[in-house]
Amino acid sequence: MKNPLKMLFSGAAGLRRGLLLYGPFLGAGVRVDELSRDFRRVRVSMGMHWYNRNYVGTHFGGSLYSMTDPFYMLMLMNNLGRDYVVWDKSASIDFVRPGKGRVFAEFELTDAMLDEVKAATAGGGKYLPTWPVTVRDGDGNTVAEVSKTLYVRRKRA
């Protein structure tokens, strides 16, 4: 008999369920609204709550960053498979305007991005792609610009 927990949390739908229960996301109020079956598109949002509001009544910067944290890594891992090592290496965030109300971030992993990673790691070397993420408010205004740098290497045989 298959493990029911493994079945509940397998695939894209299972990962989405797991992330909805993930402590840091629960604590920040982050919701994974969409995770495509092929792990190529993710949409997250975060509402304004007493527990993620800063001293001046806008979204806490750490919560804005946390809503962008693991997604490119998870997307890349699920698209490249077990022959690759993928880690989040670094990130920077530029706060553009105060975030109020529900804010959103979208991630897309394109064929071109995957091809670039595969070509750069074909010889076994590491590759450090940097990809942008924009956090927007409900009106589409930019709240923050995040740059995510990943570490990617093809495993040795």
Image: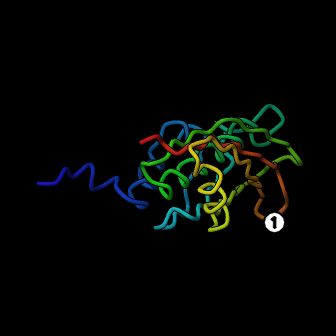
Q: Secondary structure at mark 1?
A: loop
Split into 4 quadrants, where in the image is the N terminus? Answer: bottom left
Locate residue 75 relative to residue 10 in the image: left or right.
right
Q: Quadrant of residue 90?
A: top right
Locate residue 50 relative to residue 94 in the image: left or right.
left
Name the residue beneath numbered marker 1. Answer: 139
**Residue found farthest to the right:** 96
Kind of residue indicated by mark 1:
Asp
Locate residue 125 relative to residue 129 in the image: left or right.
left
Q: Residue at x 76, y 63 (%)?
A: 138
Compare residues 88 and 104 and report the one nearer the observer. Answer: 88
Image location (x, y in percent) of residue 136:
78, 58
Locate residue 3 relative to residue 87 in the image: left or right.
left
Q: Residue at x 53, y 50 (%)?
A: 74
Q: Residue at x 78, y 38 (%)?
A: 92
Image location (x, y in percent) of residue 100:
78, 50
Compare residues 126 and 137 and report the one nearer the observer. Answer: 126
Q: Residue at x 69, y 43 (%)?
A: 128
Split into 4 quadrants, where in the image is the C terminus? Answer: top left
Image location (x, y in percent) of residue 120:
65, 51
Q: How many marks?
A: 1
Compare residues 98 and 127 and report the one nearer the observer. Answer: 127
Q: Quadrant of residue 32?
A: bottom right
